[in-house]
Amino acid sequence: MNRLTALVLPLMFLAPSAFALTYVIPKDGGRLVGQNETYVVPQGKLALEDIAAKFQLGLTNIMQANPGVDPFLPRPGSKLIIPHKLLLPDAPRKGIIINLAEMRLYYYPKGKGTVEVYPIGIGEVGRDTPENWTTKIWRKRANPTWTPTARIRADYAANGETLPKVWPAGPDNPMGLFALYVGNLYAIHGTNANFGIGLRVSHGCVRLRNDDIEALFKEVPVHTRVQFINEPIKVAVEPDGHRYIEVHEPLSKNQAQYDSNEDAPLTFNRNVKRFIANAKTNSETLKRMLEKRNGMPVRLDN
């Protein structure tokens, strides 16, 4: 279960970039990039969302790495782990890869040898963002309008709100100021809200902070490949022989599971099963990481 939405809504290899975290892709074929940081929460009322945005993270990323942190106002003077160390997804390093389980978007600019990583918000339970889907950017639009579906309009009407058939473009538009369309029903777009990145809050689209979608919009050409995956467990054998595992809380599959106080069950694909069955696997470390699900890569052979 992902409890973060319920908590929040009531309210180097690392190179600098204007908005995205930009990592140099290892030339030796490795997948481990970046370094974690430590951040001391300053005095004053600084929301966790502000800290997450400052370090290009979603709320899920920073809360998994710091269990027990106050989702609204972390305690001044407390130390937070900033999880910038990660394993690149086990997917082609081409175009855009969206890993729903970790709520991150990876963009591989053609010919640059780098990958840009953006935190995202995804679909609510029952309005899930598609997974195991490969498509492309069909078109781009600045200042998009929003045409809510009949189902969305009915849901709003049930709560006493009337939506227009077409929501006009502008800063109040739920799609924000930029949109990359990946099909008839889905888009990668901005937002008119100041929260929700790293949470399950959309009607199925992929949501980015406004500075992030503007940067991505300017870079990504039409017809760019887009692949949606759902990998809560990432594993890698690095060129030096060391073995790493990165475990995220999996997405709930239904409302009952989402509302439960229990963690969602982890599933293991063939590649992960083969990886953890290796004789070099430290069983105690494996058990600990499967329980903690902190979203950070850890060596499994030490």
Image (tube, rainbow, N blue to C red):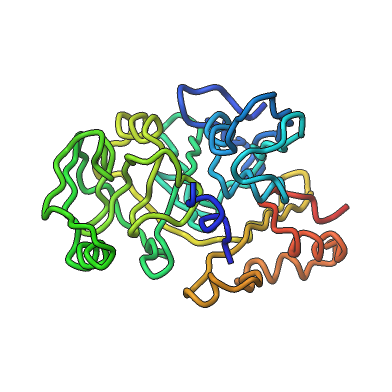
With 291 as the anchor, is 118 left or right in this view? left
Residue in the foreground of this view, choosing between 7 and 210: 7
Residue ID at (37%, 50%):
206
Q: Nearer the viewer, residue 81 or 192?
A: 192
Is residue 98 in sight in this rendering?
yes
Does 6 sit above or below residue 41? Answer: below
Q: Is residue 156 above or below residue 206?
A: below
* Residue at 75 percent of width and 59 percent of height: 292
User: For this view, does 291 lie left or right of residue 143?
Assistant: right
User: In the depicted view, which residue is nearer to us: 4 or 288?
Assistant: 4
- The residue lying at 63 percent from left, 43 percent from top is 62
Q: Quadrant of the N terminus?
A: bottom right
User: Residue 209: percent from the left, percent from the top?
Assistant: 41, 37
Q: What x and y, as percent, mark residue 67?
A: 72, 50
Q: Work out whether residue 268 can be spotted.
A: no
Given the current orientation, which residue lies at the most extreme left position?
Answer: 165
Q: Who is closer to the viewer here, 96 or 191?
A: 191
Q: Quadrant of residue 90?
A: bottom right
The relative height of residue 69 versus residue 82 in the rendered view (above or below) is below
Going by the picture, which residue comes out furthest to the front? 160
Q: What count of labels does the image hold?
A: 0
Describe residue 20's horizontal placement relative to residue 87 as left or right.
left
Answer with left or right where residue 8 lies relative to residue 109: right
Residue drawn at x 66%, y 40% as measured from the top left: 83
Image position, residue 251 (x, y; %): 53, 65
Q: In which image quadrant can residue 190 be found?
A: top left
